[in-house]
Image (cartoon, rainbow, N blue to C red):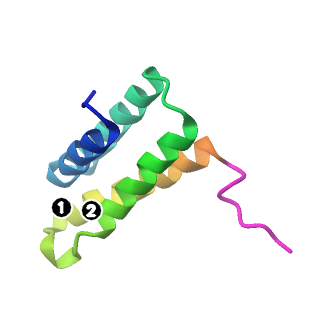
Amino acid sequence: MAKNLDDYRCKLVSKILQAPTTDHVARYFNAAIRSLKEHKVNGYVTKRFLDKIELELDAIQPDQLNTQQLYNREKAYQLTATCKYQLFPAATIPAIA
């Protein structure tokens, strides 16, 4: 694992964008989450890690990306949403008044 989570996140985002297929994106993402679990990273820290991945991907303008990178970014969004739901299922459901 990298020196800190920010370095690790930056490397992961870079791998996501450079992945040849969305299957590779899923493998990189799953390996990162598995590593966080192995290092016993708190769930809230993991959620923040996922939020920052989304923010970093949002910061990249779509016109700067090729078609495969756009697919990879969309796959990463799907994976972060799924992971957040698994971590905090009740937090992702909007409250009904």
Of 71 and 47, nearer the camera is: 47
Indicate whether 85 appears above or below 37: below
Residue at coordinates 43% horizontally, 22% vertically from top-left?
39
Q: Which mark is residue 71?
A: 2
Q: Is residue 63 left or right of residue 78?
A: left
Of 7 and 35, nearer the camera is: 7
Place of residue 32 in the rendered image (x, y in percent of width and height, measured from the top left)? 35, 34
Place of residue 20 in the rendered image (x, y in percent of width and height, measured from the top left)? 15, 49
Callout 1 secondary element: helix
Mark 2 and mark 1 in contact (Cβ < 8 Å)? yes
Query: Which region is colored magenta?
Result: 89-97
Residue at coordinates 43% horizontally, 50% vertically from top-left?
50
**90 within the magenta span:** yes
Overall secondary structure of the magenta section: loop
Q: Which mark is residue 68?
A: 1
The amino acid sitting under disc 2 is Tyr
Q: Quadrant of the C terminus?
A: bottom right
Residue at the farthest right position: 97
Q: Separation of disc 1 and disc 2 at Cα?
A: 5 Å
Callout 2 secondary element: helix
Residue at coordinates 41% horizontally, 35% vertically from top-left?
33
Question: For mark 1, does the 10 Å Cα neighbourhood hold few (<14), some (14 to 19), or many (20 or more) residues?
Answer: some
Residue at coordinates 19% horizontally, 45% vertically from top-left?
15
Indicate whether 61 appears above or below 6: below
Residue at the farthest front position: 3
Q: Quadrant of the N terminus?
A: top left
Question: For mark 2, does the 10 Å Cα neighbourhood hold few (<14), some (14 to 19), or many (20 or more) residues?
Answer: some
The amino acid sitting under disc 1 is Gln
